[in-house]
Amino acid sequence: MTTRATELLRVVHARPGVTRADAARLIGVGTGATTELVGRLGQAELLAEGPTAPSGARGRPTTALIPHPRGPLIAAASITHEAWRVDVVELGGSILATAGEELAGRSGDEVVAALGAAVHRLRIEYRDRIRGIGISVPGTVSRDLMLDASQLGWQDVDLAVAWPRAEIFVAGNDATLAASAESRRGIAVGAAVALHLRIEAGLGGAVVDGGRVLIGALGASGEFGHMPFGDPAVRCPCGAFGCWGTAVDGSALARLLGHETPPDPVTYARRIITDPNPEPAAAAATVATALGRGIAGLVNGLDADLVTLGGLGVDLLAAAPAQLLAAYEAGLMSFRRATPPPVLPALLGDNGPIVGAAEEAWTALLARLT
Ligand SMILES: [Zn+2]
């Protein structure tokens, strides 16, 4: 495969439904050469042509470049604090099939085994068209694919069990993958320095500098929830005291309301945050304030021009926007206050991590198709 062919596949992946003429312009190739490229990619069962989605525009119908019906696919998986899921994703990002279930208190090894069984079934169903897997996880992943998820109490869980000897196997932290997805397919496309913060059980995130995710020396960057912006008397599951994450998640709400630590922290937090009664509303406002203050600290330190929120961050912004934004602006250095960097809900919402996992796997696969 030539470089031009790979570029064309990348364009079709990034802009599903692109017309042949637009794709030709984007890769800087004439229409004749593009016709030949499309023909070759069709023979290789990578690309096909089909009608464009109706846009409402009048005129001659054009054809769009679409994934080949027998083309390669990726399995994109996510493990959250409450459930696992696996999607079959084609070129362009569309989902062809999905499977998943609740964690239901199972161990990390059991969850990865269940996920692996689903991947195996899907590989048979799609007759070996699935070429690789990307997995999003609520913790840190070592280079040899061992997962530690302190909030779930999981240590040394072997993710490779999900697909032993896979041709392509990528895994990453959910907040990092959500940040990457938001900068590729979400609201942060084109931002200079985008900060993404995701609250589930605890808080994680990532900085995307000019489209490139800062992953750190060990690949464990973005653990913003473990900066000491919280109450120094509160011990975090990570072992440190005063972590910011413990001031903004479901455990913070439970502490403020005198409840037991909930087994389903995200569902619990959503219920409290949307409860209009005075006591839960006051707790949500306190937590939103702690979130806003911390965001200000990060914007001051990183000089971000956009902040996106995922997970419970979206719920807090919707429930207590005045408190969150007042604390944010009060914490900003005065020169930033005239035009504070916007704090917005992530466009991809709860799908951010799994979309990011699909994108990472597709990036690896597109490089191999050349
Ligand atoms: Zn911590």
Image (cartoon, helix red, strand yellow):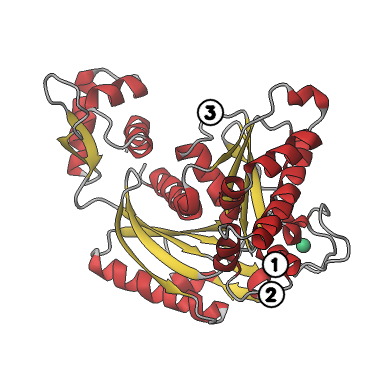
Residue 221 position (above or below residue 258): above
SS of the residue at dot 3? loop
* Residue at which label 2 appears: 261
| Residue mark closest to the camera, 3 vs 2 | 2
Q: In this view of the protein, which residue sits in the foreground, 123 or 203? A: 203
Residue 196 position (above or below residue 112): above
CA gap, disc 1 to disc 3?
35 Å
Inspect the image, locate mark 3, and give the three-letter code of the amino acid beneath it: Gly
CA gap, disc 1 to disc 2?
6 Å
Q: Is residue 118 left or right of 263 when viewed as pictured?
A: left
Place of residue 306 in the rendered image (x, y in percent of width and height, measured from the top left): 62, 33
Task: Report if the CB atoms under discs 1 and 2 are less than 8 Å apart.
Answer: yes
- For the C terminus, the image quarter is top left
Q: Earlier in the sequence, mark 1 or mark 2?
A: 1
Q: Earlier in the sequence, mark 3 or mark 2?
A: 3
Q: Earlier in the sequence, mark 1 or mark 3?
A: 3
SS of the residue at dot 1? helix
At x 65%, y 64%, the residue is 250
Inspect the image, locate mark 1, and give the three-letter code of the amino acid beneath it: Ser
* Residue at which label 1 appears: 251
Residue 351 position (above or below residue 239): above
SS of the residue at dot 2? loop
Place of residue 180 in the rendered image (x, y in percent of width and height, measured from the top left): 54, 44
